[in-house]
Image (tube, coloured by chain):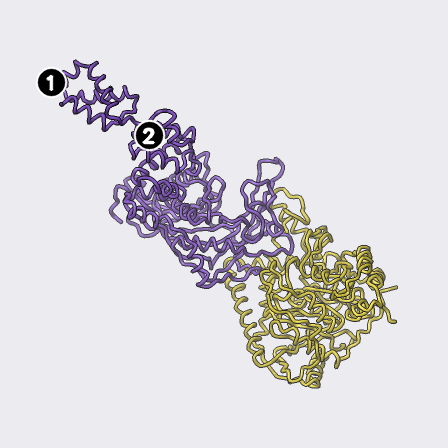
Chain colours: A purple, B yellow
């Protein structure tokens, strides 16, 4: 890789060009009503310690019992990541003491995870790029320590204790903050399609540990990496990577050496700082959990799960391109989010595909962006958008009027047919009525007509504008053009 | 009529069913005797008042279909009992009251049994003499100043002293069979997965198994029938068809092949034990069984393997006693300081020793050499048994390499203490059922036991063998009530 192409992410210092190598460990909360080893609820935002069973709080003699549904969710996710499903996997205990870890160990999977190698395909501007997945394993979440309510003590909320997480470990295949952005979004999209994780980063359903190293372009050997723990937004991940990569490059350029360590990202100062060095790393004393038998299932089980896998983003994208003749760009945007793709497919049931794609990626996205809404919260539902587009297609309203109607719909959430009728926005397409208006414009602008006829062609636009004005914007532009031309040239 | 407390469990059940004795009469008899036996230090918690109330309740509308109709039971304090203090004989759980019931005790109450109280044991079941209990050591009714064995020492002592008609213990490396052997009683460790571990304070999860401790083999089969059940709350519980152990109990062992493992003849074992073992073989032959010499070549490695696996699991299982959620909490400057003080004050010496061993063998750099190797050896030990069980139906061994020892005799010598479990530990490592039955006395008139080891889930077979031998041995426990003034 001696050639550094212009779209690659490069950090340059003292004339030396560095590339950034990134691997992610994403913690995705399994979408499940109950916890991984207990029957407690998992609802977000409940009163502290109201979703805690004796198992979650690690009372003496309590034993974990695997939640079959969480296993299925992990297998589904593995299939969605084109990964190898391990028919035998083992739950291990990861031992460490902390106030919000009631058992004194976390049940996780160490040497034998439920899912092995797979991949995720990113749609980069330069074309598709495959990011390798190392593994996916199941583990319990810890509780939450709260330090800022009682000045004298730490409070513990165990609602999250025992909630199922999937840890998805990527290979060190990512090369820029933008690739990380696309990777997280793609991963989230796949899991939302599968219904295995809601991907809600504000609620902590998706967090990541980010491994960052740098090396000079052309080097084969990976540099020493630092792990930035528990970053909970894409923006922070990108900021942390940029800061960390630059820090490492500067250190190397000063003749220093990178220490393998765990770092924290301080979102207020926008910098990473050392949390613990490799020497201080915990010895987790992993060993197979004797309370749980190895998890085993057969091919038939996997086949049955496969039957439940819906069409995934990559497949859907290809279908949209082939069946609807969308551009890859349009298709990528429309499938990136399951709800968007559903919205699109609903609209095109009754409306023109191309027009639908344009309006959804244009007007609708702008509206949602502006109001900071998800498509599922859109004030304009797919049925109403479809009706609006059909009003354009059948010539009832012009595209321009449609934008006005769209704006009214975004506030009133009303049926566009009703709006057009009530506000009298229907396009004037009666040639006789338009002729009257045109005649009026021409009569009151006789001097301009003369100028036009003597060769000042540019004035045609002026006449169109005047007629439109007379029609209060409702005149059919094609018809106005046609009649006007006849009158002026005839 | 003889004294109520002299009757066996089965006799009591029969008498209740035929309405000759009421539950209250039985309960009263055991309460009265227990009250006079504080010197043995068997009880940690006595629930005599509620026991009597419950017996009255039972008598008012007796359900005689039950397997243990209105029979009072004192149980090892490792079983969580709802609303009743459960300590595991540790300071760290000194005031812990569970809000839940262990499956095993629930099975007992569902069968009509009544709780008399919670019995002393080694702290977290770690010990072979009941000297590691925070609540003081237990004395054997066999003789003043003699240990009852451990860890179910309180259970064995209470049973032998007739403070409970039968009882339950837990056995991780011999904790039922060794004290049974020391006190002249019957103790069975079932196949791993037969009895639920739900609600039992965990010591070493892959080895722990609850089992019955009784005065005779028939009682043992009845109690096992009540205890053993499939429990979805314990992922290692096995769903197999459980026989009616008591109903199916018989003395027909004709043609059964019994293996005698040469590796169990250890150096320095008292002659009496050897003699007893020989006598056992003779009895079996008299019953029509065939004696087969066998070899279990990895027996020597069982004890070191056990003392890696069990502490490793224990070190992790006991991490939850950290002062945060329940149990003892010592004040500390910060979280780490609180942990250190709580656990330093809350755990006894033996428990600390095993936590340290377990932490060490799981540590990075030592894991492969200790824990992983021990797991491999454990597999070899299991294979030894699998191989011989192709040739024999059961195995006969001594239960222990010596009889009961004096209080304090071994408490400062952990290795010598650990050697007590040399014949019982392989059975736990292989997950097999094993029963200890009283077989004779040594020169001091201290009881000695023989152990019968069976195939997985073949409890009926070893019970039948034990039942046949019991008749031939005709062991009589001659205990004078010296501790009652």
Residue A377 shows which numbered tag? none
Q: Earlier in the sequence, mark 1 or mark 2?
A: 2
Disc 2 on helix, strand or loop? helix
Q: Which of B45 and B19 lies nearest the eye of the viewer?
A: B19
**Residue at the left extreme of this rendering:** A454
Residue in view at x 39 percent, y 35 percent: A384
Q: Which residue is mark 1?
A: A454
Q: Residues within 10 Å of mark 1 (few under 14, many from 20)?
A: few
Disc 1 on helix, strand or loop? loop
Residue in view at x 34 percent, y 41 percent: A348
Return the x and y of residue B191 as percentages of the image width and height.
62, 69
**Residue at the front extreme of this rendering:** A432
Q: Is residue B200 left or right of residue B139?
A: left
Asked whether disc 1 touches disc 2, contact meaning CB atoms under 8 Å apart, the reply is no
Res. A486 image quadrant: top left
Chain at tag 2: A
Res. B37 image quadrant: bottom right
> Looking at the figure, which quarter contains the N terminus of chain B?
bottom right
Return the x and y of residue A165 as percentages of the image width and height.
49, 50
Return the x and y of residue B397 as percentages of the image width and height.
66, 77
Return the x and y of residue A195 as percentages of the image width and height.
45, 48
Q: Relative to residue A430, is residue A170 depicted above or below?
A: below
Q: Is residue B259 left or right of residue A168?
A: right
Q: Which of A213 and A254 lies nearest the eye of the viewer?
A: A213
Q: Which residue is mark 2?
A: A402
Q: Which of B205 and B38 lies nearest the eye of the viewer?
A: B205
Regarding residue B448, the answer to whether it shows in the image is yes
């Amino acid at each position: 890789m001696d050639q550094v192409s212009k779209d690659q992410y490069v950090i340059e210092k003292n004339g030396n060009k560095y590339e950034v190598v990134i691997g992610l460990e994403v913690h995705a909360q399994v979408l499940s009503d109950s916890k991984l080893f207990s029957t407690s609820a998992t609802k977000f935002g409940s009163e502290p310690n109201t979703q805690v069973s004796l198992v979650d709080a690690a009372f003496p003699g309590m034993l974990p019992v695997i939640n079959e549904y969480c296993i299925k969710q992990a297998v589904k996710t593995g299939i969605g990541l084109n990964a190898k499903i391990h028919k035998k996997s083992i739950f291990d205990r990861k031992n460490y003491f902390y106030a919000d870890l009631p058992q004194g160990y976390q049940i996780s999977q160490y040497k034998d995870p439920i899912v092995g190698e797979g991949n995720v395909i990113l749609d980069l501007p330069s074309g598709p790029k495959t990011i390798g997945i190392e593994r996916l394993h199941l583990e319990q979440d810890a509780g939450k320590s709260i330090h800022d309510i009682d000045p004298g003590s730490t409070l513990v909320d165990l609602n999250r204790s025992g909630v199922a997480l999937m840890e998805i470990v990527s290979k060190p295949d990512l090369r820029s903050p933008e690739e990380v952005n696309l990777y997280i979004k793609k991963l989230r999209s796949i899991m939302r399609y599968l219904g295995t994780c809601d991907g809600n980063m504000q609620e902590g359903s998706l967090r990541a540990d980010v491994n960052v190293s740098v090396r000079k372009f052309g080097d084969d050997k990976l540099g020493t990496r630092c792990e930035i723990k528990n970053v909970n937004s894409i923006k922070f991940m990108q900021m942390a990577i940029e800061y960390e990569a630059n820090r490492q490059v500067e250190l190397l350029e000063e003749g220093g050496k990178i220490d393998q360590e765990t770092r924290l990202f301080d979102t207020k100062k926008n910098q990473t700082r050392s949390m613990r060095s490799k020497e201080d790393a915990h010895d987790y004393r992993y060993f197979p959990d004797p309370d749980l038998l190895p998890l085993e299932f057969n091919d038939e089980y996997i086949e049955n799960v496969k039957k439940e896998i819906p069409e995934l983003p990559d497949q859907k994208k290809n279908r949209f391109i082939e069946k609807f003749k969308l551009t890859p760009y349009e298709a990528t945007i429309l499938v990136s989010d399951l709800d968007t793709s559903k919205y699109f497919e609903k609209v095109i049931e009754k409306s023109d595909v191309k027009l639908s794609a344009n309006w959804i990626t244009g007007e609708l996205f702008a509206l949602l962006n502006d109001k900071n809404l998800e498509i599922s919260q859109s004030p304009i539902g797919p049925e109403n958008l479809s009706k609006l587009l059909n009003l354009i297609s059948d010539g009832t309203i012009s595209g321009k009027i449609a934008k006005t109607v769209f704006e009214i719909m975004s506030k009133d959430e009303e049926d566009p047919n009703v709006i057009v009728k009530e506000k009298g926005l229907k396009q004037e397409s009666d040639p006789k009525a338009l002729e009257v208006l045109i005649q009026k414009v021409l009569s009151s602008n006789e001097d301009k007509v003369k100028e036009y006829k003597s060769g000042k062609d540019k004035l045609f636009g002026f006449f169109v504008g005047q007629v439109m004005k007379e029609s209060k914007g409702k005149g059919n532009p094609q018809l106005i053009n046609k009649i006007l031309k006849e009158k002026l040239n005839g | 009529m003889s004294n109520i407390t002299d009757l066996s469990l089965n006799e009591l059940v029969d008498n209740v069913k035929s309405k000759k004795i009421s539950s209250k009469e039985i309960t009263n008899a055991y309460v009265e005797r227990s009250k006079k036996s504080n010197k043995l230090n068997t009880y940690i918690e006595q629930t005599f008042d509620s026991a009597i109330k419950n017996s009255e309740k039972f008598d008012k509308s007796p359900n005689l279909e039950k397997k243990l109709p209105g029979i009072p039971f004192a149980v090892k304090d490792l079983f969580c009992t709802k609303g009743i203090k459960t300590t595991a004989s540790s300071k760290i759980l000194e005031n812990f009251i569970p809000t839940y019931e262990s499956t095993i005790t629930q099975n007992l109450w569902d069968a009509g049994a009544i709780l008399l109280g919670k019995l002393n044991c080694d702290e977290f079941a770690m010990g072979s003499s009941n000297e590691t209990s925070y609540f003081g050591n237990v004395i054997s009714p066999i003789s003043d100043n003699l240990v009852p064995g451990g860890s179910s020492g309180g259970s064995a002592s209470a049973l032998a002293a007739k403070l409970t008609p039968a009882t339950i213990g837990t056995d991780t490396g011999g904790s039922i069979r060794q004290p049974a052997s020391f006190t002249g009683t019957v103790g069975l460790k079932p196949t791993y997965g037969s009895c639920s571990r739900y609600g039992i304070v965990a010591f070493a999860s892959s080895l722990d198994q609850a089992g019955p401790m009784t005065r005779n083999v028939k009682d043992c089969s009845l109690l096992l029938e009540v205890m053993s059940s499939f429990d979805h709350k314990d992922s290692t519980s096995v769903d197999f068809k459980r026989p009616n152990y008591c109903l199916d109990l018989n003395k027909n062992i004709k043609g059964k092949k019994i293996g005698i493992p040469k590796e169990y003849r250890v150096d320095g074992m008292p002659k009496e034990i050897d003699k007893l073992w020989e006598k056992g073989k003779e009895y079996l032959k008299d019953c029509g069984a065939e004696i087969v010499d066998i070899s279990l070549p990895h027996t020597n490695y069982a004890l070191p393997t056990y003392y890696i696996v069990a502490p490793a699991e224990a070190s992790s299982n006991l991490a939850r006693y950290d002062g945060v959620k329940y149990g003892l909490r010592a004040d500390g400057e910060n979280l780490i300081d609180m942990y250190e003080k709580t656990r330093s004050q809350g755990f006894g010496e033996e428990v600390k020793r095993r936590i340290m061993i377990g932490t060490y063998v799981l540590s990075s750099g030592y894991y492969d050499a200790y824990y992983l190797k021990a797991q491999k050896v454990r597999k070899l030990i299991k294979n030894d048994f699998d191989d011989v069980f192709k040739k024999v139906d059961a195995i006969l061994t001594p239960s222990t390499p010596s009889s009961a020892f004096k209080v304090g005799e071994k408490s400062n010598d952990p290795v010598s203490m650990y050697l007590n479990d040399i014949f019982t530990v392989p059975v736990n490592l292989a997950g097999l059922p094993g029963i200890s039955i009283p077989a004779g006395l040594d020169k001091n008139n201290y009881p000695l036991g023989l152990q019968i080891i069976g195939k997985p889930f073949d409890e009926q077979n070893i019970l039948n063998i034990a039942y046949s031998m019991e008749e031939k041995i005709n062991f009589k426990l001659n205990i004078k009530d010296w501790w009652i003034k």
